[in-house]
Image (cartoon, helix red, strand yellow):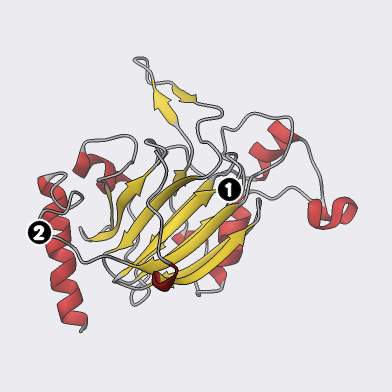
Amino acid sequence: MPATPIAESRIVHHERVPGGRYWSMVVRRGFTLRLVDTDGTANAALLAYNPSNPLERYNMADTLKGQHVSRLSQGNMLFSDMGRAMLSIVEDTVGWHDPIGGISDAESIQRRFGEARFQEHWNDFYRNGRELFLIELAKWGLGPRDLVSPVNFFQKVSVNDDGDLHYAAEHSHPGASVDLRADSDTLVVLTTAPHPMAPGPIYQPGPVDVSIYRSAPVRDDDACIHHRPENARAYANTLIANCQEG
């Protein structure tokens, strides 16, 4: 099912993040972030922080146990470690996004793809998610202690009965998209390095198109808020915080 078209008058920002790169921006309350897997090979690893107090950030454990899930899709929210709703998945054409696979590092990239250093390959050197996140986080005064497990959008990792993780190759498709409504002002930090479980041997991370547009008003019957009782409580906590912050 294709994504709902966005009227040009609602879009306030659009750009393409190449594969193996980084991006960040504060998405204000009342706006929605759309991520598009341009050619069907992207891994959009995402972290979220409260820009007014970066000690509050997306918390994988609370997000999953609060909604009784091990994957994220339409209707789910990204909870902060203070029990607030940061981002709501209001539309999703993929159906499964990975919150448990973690971040690629230099060792995992070298093991799967080999080594391609900047000294020999210049801008075509192999980048990994951990280094890219740390570079982008530094722009906001954040560092290694602020690096937590991200959501890997457009990727699928499942768990079998024995507790083993299984990576699903070719899970996404060209033009796949996910829309994240900002329920409070949220610093979004994104990298497009390969997933840590992605098989080699070809290093070719895909690009992600990023759009920010004005959100529709939140309805009384909003599917994300009513997805679970915990979602409604998290959203209520967010409304209280938004009022206190003005």
Residue 187 lies left or right of residue 196; in this view the side is left
User: Is 40 in front, or is 26?
Assistant: 40
Q: Which residue is mark 2?
A: 220
Q: Amino acid at mark 2?
A: Asp
Q: Residue at x 65, y 55 (%)?
A: 18
Percent from the top left, x then y, of residue 66? 20, 44
Residue 114 lies left or right of residue 105; in this view the side is right
Dot 1 surroundings within 10 Å: few (below 14), some, or many (20 or more)?
A: many
- Callout 1: SS: loop
CA distance for labels 1 and 2: 33 Å
Residue at the outermost top position: 162
User: Is 7 in front, or is 143?
Assistant: 7
Percent from the top left, x then y, of residue 209? 55, 56
Q: Amino acid at mark 1?
A: Thr
Disc ID at residue 75: none
Image quadrant where residue 164 sits: top left
- Callout 2: SS: loop
Dot 2 surroundings within 10 Å: few (below 14), some, or many (20 or more)?
A: few
Q: Residue at x 66, y 51 (%)?
A: 20
Of marks 1 and 2, which one's residue comes earlier in the chain? Answer: 1
Question: Where is the N terminus found, in terms of image quarters?
Answer: top left
Q: Residue at x 74, y 34 (%)?
A: 202
Number of numbered labels in the structure image: 2
Percent from the top left, x then y, of residue 153? 46, 45
Q: Mark 1 and 2 residues: CB-CB less than 8 Å, in contact?
A: no
Residue at the outermost bottom position: 246
Q: Which residue is mark 1?
A: 38
Image quadrant where residue 47 sits: bottom left
Question: Where is the C terminus found, in terms of image quarters?
Answer: bottom left
Percent from the top left, x then y, of residue 95? 37, 36
